[in-house]
Image (cartoon, helix red, strand yellow):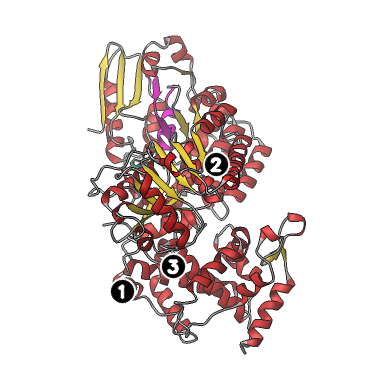
Amino acid sequence: MTVTFYRKGSAAFVTLDNPPVNAIGLSVRQGLSKALDWIAEEDDLTRVILSGAGRMFAAGADAREFDGPAQPPHLPDIISRIETCAIPWVAVITGVALGGGCELALGCRVRIMSPKAQIGLPEVTLGVIPGAGGTQRLPRVIGMAKAVRMISSGRPISAVDAERFGLIEGIADDPMEYARHLDLGTLELSIPPCDMPPPTLHQQALADARTMAARKMAHQRAPQVAIDLVEASAMHPLDVGLAQERAAFLDLRQGDQARALRHVFFAERGARAPADLVAAPADLSHVAVVGGGMMGSGIAYALLGAGLDVTLIEADADGAARAQSNVDRIMAASEARGLTTPDDVAERQARLQITQDYADAAHAGLAIEAAFESMDVKASVFADLSKVMPENAILATNTSYLDLDAIAACVPDPSRVIGLHFFAPAHIMKLLEIVRGAQTSDRAMATGYALAKRLRKVPVPAGVCDGFIGNRILARYREAADTVLMDGATPWEIDEAMVAFGYAMGPYEAQDLSGLDIAFAQRRRQDATRDPARRYIPIADRMVELGKLGRKTGAGWYRYPGGAGKVDDPIVADLAIEEAHFAGITRRDFEPSEICDRLLCAMVNEAADLLDQGIAASASDIDLVMVHGYGFPRWRGGLMHWAQVHGLDRIVASINRYAKEDALAWQLSPTLEDAARSGGFHLTKA
Ligand code: 3HC
């Protein structure tokens, strides 16, 4: 039974009991219906107390049901029955009341929260809108301005804010006790939203919300539809608004965007240590980081933020000073953004030790090397670490490209070595590629997953290859872009096409941000092994020779006069024309749709090869990598989800067409061909 109910004295207790998050699926709706029937038959009840068993009130409607047809009893009908019930209902909110959970609470006469609880309507983050009255009742209860902000952003609010907004009656350490003893007069006098007048229209708040949603959730339908419905709440009686809301909800939840966002949501939940990984992780209370550059200091800050003690090792006094100033800069930025207080900063600094002595890492359970990307440097760091650290400590490298197995060979026990590939800025980016080498132990893998959990990152396992999952796909993306650039497009045409697809920025603007020298160094590393028959586009090399390294030099693919916004650079366009001329290429125009098709097909093909080679474990892992590490639009569901929706047969046809120009670059992946024939990739893990 997922809903239990009983009476004690004149109070009825209805409890949602559907672990782990009390998602409101069919059985919960049926249970609530039964509870309502039972209450209608009971005499002398004065209140009904609705709560959630376990750690929360309710996470909302069961999103797993959204792929099928809506089945009665429907949540909006249940909430209307609660709202109009002769006996007043009191919601006791612990943990979270989200989505349908918040809407259930809105149907109650009174809401009480525990101090740490949160309440909100995050539906837009799943590509839908509140579908059980949220867009109509919330503005009536707290006013249009606050309601539209909550609904269009999807961000939950704290108990303190909920009380300040007038959304709840009170906050109590023991909200159940509070609800049981709530004064009867208060209960009887409280007005249900259905008897409240429509909210006053707040045009400015609506306009602000529309602008914000267009900026932060560009291309997404749900936030704009939600805002329209909040606006409609001021113009229609509740029943009309509810009917409009329900129709919009049902329409959106079938749509491509909602399906894609659900796919990412569930892929994120599935990203955790596999059940058969039973080894105990290393102790993470003290972690050593080697290298205090931008990456190392970001990692150190992330570790401090998760409550761990950190020893940051640098090679010399200058390096140590630079590391300290890098960490200080991150701390100051997070304080300036209001994410930390001066006390937090002091407390974190107290847990940070910056040293030049490896012996200070002697008691750490894990070391993460984030030193210069050179095999010689890594070999010496790992040799030093393995000398001082306990035998059961895990040694991780943050290398992006170097061979993990070669690094592991530098220590007597290579099973201790693992790749933990963070993404810059490491304290913000959610992705963590956990790279398993040929000899990496289960204990090392378990440690990687445990660390991801502590840091609240999305862990994705990867095998050893040049670039692991993300950077290998990125290299192919850039190669396809450079080819289009050489053959006739400009960097800004290519960027615009990808932005129109949904990226926040295209490949060239992104390179300007990270610096063209990084990819240059990588290309030099690959010179020895690159197939000489493969077409090589030298434009990016010419850029580096000209000192156009991106934003940091004031110019890259674009110019940044005065360090401000980007400006198209005719020199870059001329460079492409010149190189094409040297190569004897007759340039031509590219439509945005063809640019997108080429870049996306190149990535999908590479990703399919990664599956084939066992570098990536599942298509949904690739989606997580692309969404959390490479800016692939979340609302497209990630690369592989997009590929399925777009049509794998169309992608295969494109690749075969492009292969006629360049058979080497466009070798169709057998895994992609199979998937197209057999109806798709297995998106989730077996
Ligand atoms: N539907 C179905 N399953 C859900 C769910 C939901 N709304 N929310 C969470 N789950 C599942 C997860 O998939 C996971 O399942 P698994 O163990 O089988 O992988 C399990 O519950 C635990 O979830 P988390 O790992 O996310 O647990 P946390 O404690 O870290 O977080 C949470 C809890 C904050 C509630 C988080 O799960 C969350 O944000 N959930 C989604 C909230 C949401 O978007 N609600 C709106 C739903 S749409 C709606 O209500 C429509 C309505 O207006 C009609």
Is 148 drawn above or below residue 383 in the view shown?
Answer: above
Pointer 3 local density, CA inside 10 Å: few below 14, some 14–19, many at least 20? few
- Using the rendered view, name the quadrant where residue 139 is placed: top right
Q: Is residue 501 left or right of residue 382?
A: right
Q: What residue is rendered at 49% in x and 42% in y?
A: 312
The numbered mark, 2 or 3, whose residue comes first in the sequence reads 2
Mark 2 lies on residue: 153
Q: Residue furthest bottom?
A: 584
Three-letter residue code for mark 3: His
Badge 3 element: helix
Mark 1 lies on residue: 674
User: Mark 2 and mark 1: span between their CA atoms?
Assistant: 41 Å
For the residue pair 188 and 670, the one nearer the viewer reads as 670
Residue 458 painted magenta: no
The numbered mark, 1 or 3, whose residue comes first in the sequence reads 3
Q: What residue is rendered at 47% in x and 55% in y?
A: 627
Three-letter residue code for mark 1: Asp
Q: Which quadrant of the picture is home to ligand 1?
A: top left
For the residue pair 217 and 350, the one nearer the viewer reads as 350
Q: Which residues are magenta?
A: 86-112
Q: What residue is rendered at 46% in x and 19% in y?
A: 171
Is 601 drawn above or below residue 378 in the view shown?
Answer: below
Badge 2 element: helix
Is there CB contact under 8 Å for labels 2 and 3? no
